Image: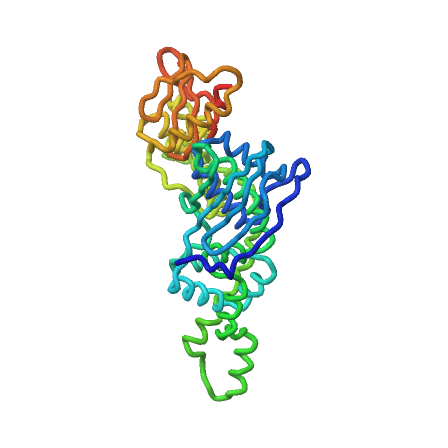
Amino acid sequence: MKPDVSAARGFPAFPRQRAGARFATSWWGRAWIKAMEDTSLDHGLLRKGRAYAKTGQVGPITVSPGRLAAVSETGYDAEYHTVVRVEQLGDADWERFLDQVAAKAGHIAALLDGDMPHDLVRAAADAGVPLLPTVGDLEPECSCPDWGHPCKHAAALCYQASWLLDDDPFVLLLLRGRGRPELVEALQGRSLPTSPAAAAGAAGAAGARQGTPAAEAFSLGVPPLPEPPAVDVAFTPLELDPAPGVEVAALRVLAASASARARELLVSGRSAALSEYQDRVRLAADHDLDLGLEAAVRAWRYGGATGLDVLESAWTPPRQELARSRALLEAGWEGERPPAPEAWRNRWTMGETQLRYGRDGRWYPFERRDGRWWPAGPPERDPSVLLA
């Protein structure tokens, strides 16, 4: 689809911000920044981009369908033209999105009030309409000589765009292809769902009618669930009397373990499925059991199941992830260039220290002890932090 120039919106340049100013206070603004940062391979360029954004080195911003543009000023009489492209939604996508907005009366009110409801974004995604960008969805272009993707000017533009998104979620919808007037007009032609109270009144007036047609009931939507109760309970150790064939101490440990996992499920809504061996290590770690699994217990305490996997198996991460980690190591290293690690699959060895890359995107530190590598601390996403 070609950009609709008539739908473009212009925003004045942001002035220099006060110290401690934050980017993206809204959840959809944070999702926008995450999509940009997760694509970056150079932490140093992101840091410079944040500084450019806060010091007002980005000019007026133009938002149009599929396109975010601005002219960046470097302070050295040089200007760079920066564009960030976003894929537009097709006509069929917009029809499905409008169906989701119209399915609940509160959606359009929330949008007009400057809010992007979570359930609307989820419903749109379930209907095959991606509103929020993810890794690789933002395509930056800039006339500067930086090799980074994004460069510091494109990063600064994206950081400032998060402020625009905070103030008006219709900016995101415009980037996806349609502006506020067009969307409001399209929604006016659709019938919003009847509230439960109005539906009940209509049913009473009809008198003899029994039940509600399925289409009408479906259009009412699902009412929001109440907030879960506060989790302020604690496990009370079992008072058990000895009995033939019953290991009372072991039973107490199992009961405490089951209680802890039940609480985890209640709080987070999930509880990882563990193998028999993983569960044995977990029990030893949680209850200080001496099962001859010292290294495994240390790995579990630092990183759970992922930490245990890092201890016991090697794997080959995508090259892009390793390249990003190398850039973080160089950007965060103080003084001379960091030492070149001896690399093998997901393991970087530097003398008596070894870093292992986990499947959760974090680096786990190990130290050599008696000819073996032992877990040495909690993981970090930035390897330079572990080598400082």
Looking at the picture, how far across and down is residue 3, in whole percent?
44, 57
Residue 325 visible in this rendered orientation of the protein:
yes
Q: Residue at x 49, y 31 (%)?
A: 43
Q: Residue at x 46, y 86 (%)?
A: 209
Q: Is residue 298 above or below residue 75?
A: above
Q: Residue at x 48, y 61 (%)?
A: 178
Name the foreground residue: 238 vs 18: 18
Residue 236 visible in this rendered orientation of the protein:
no
Furthest residue in direction top, as rendered: 370
Q: Is residue 207 above or below residue 360?
A: below
Q: How many marks?
A: 0
- Residue 14 lies in what quarter of the image? top right
Q: Is residue 314 left or right of residue 224?
A: left
Q: Is residue 25 above or below residue 253?
A: below
- Residue 297 lies in what quarter of the image? top left
Name the quarter where the N terminus is drawn: bottom left
Furthest residue in direction front, as rendered: 77
State the scheme by which the image is colored. rainbow
- Residue 317 lies in what quarter of the image? top left
Name the foreground residue: 3 vs 155: 3
Looking at the picture, how far across and down is residue 172, in whole percent?
51, 54
Looking at the picture, how far across and down is residue 200, in whole percent?
54, 79
Q: Residue at x 41, y 33 (%)?
A: 361
Q: Is residue 27 above or below residue 344?
A: below
Name the foreground residue: 353 vs 116: 116
Looking at the picture, how far across and down is residue 104, in whole percent?
51, 67
